[in-house]
Image (cartoon, helix red, strand yellow):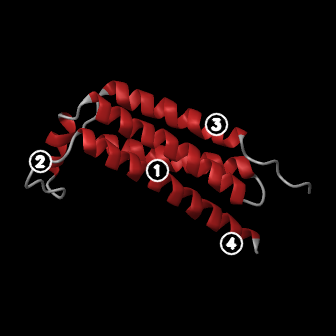
Amino acid sequence: MPSAARSFIAIVAGMVVAVTCVSVFDLIAGSFHPVPEGFDPKNWEQVKAHAANAPTPALLVVLLGWVVGAFAGGVVSSRIAERKRKGYAYIISTLILAATISNFFTVPHPMWMMTAAIIGIGVAGLQAARLAPPDPAA
């Protein structure tokens, strides 16, 4: 398989795994803080009000989803990549971090959660890179 195709597949697969993890944890968090009857996810005022009233256990589960997603996606991506494998773990964790920070600007989050997310996702990316297989000899 051409190197560029393998790189593309590594990034797509890593992001699919990462987003799936985040989504599963979001569903679990929803059991702690279900949306009310008549909730409209397209109404940003409703979304912001719902998020502002989220209990700590739900926020912790969401946070864990971001961290697990960054880690699992980074591990998968680095194992599919042909070379410079650690870099793929960093790419996935950076993309998850960027999406998370973007989320901070649209939906209110407590400061402790934002701080923990930035640190946790960064550490998850570093740990995923540590687990990357060694690059093949040139």
Residue at 73%, 46% (x, y): give it. 132
Question: Mark 1 or mark 3: which comes first in sequence?
Answer: 1
Query: Are there few (<14), some (14-19), or many (20+) residues within 10 Å of tag 3?
Result: some
Residues under labels 2 and 1: Cα distance?
A: 24 Å
Q: CA distance from mark 3 to mark 2?
A: 38 Å
Relative image position of residue 125 (x, y in whole percent):
60, 40
**Residue position for label 4:** 5
Looking at numbered disc 1 in the image, what kind of residue is underneath it? Cys
Residue at 63% across, 54% down: 76
The residue identified by callout 1 is 21
- Residue at the spot of label 3: 126
Q: Amino acid at mark 3?
A: Leu
Residue pushed farthest right? 138
Q: Residue furthest left?
A: 38
Q: Nearer the viewer, mark 4 or mark 1?
A: 1
**The N terminus, quarter of image:** bottom right
Q: Is residue 58 visible?
A: yes
Tags 2 and 4 in contact by the CB under 8 Å rule? Answer: no
Amino acid at dot 2: Pro
Q: Is residue 115 left or right of residue 81?
A: left
Which of pointers 2 and 1 lies earlier in the amino acid sequence?
A: 1
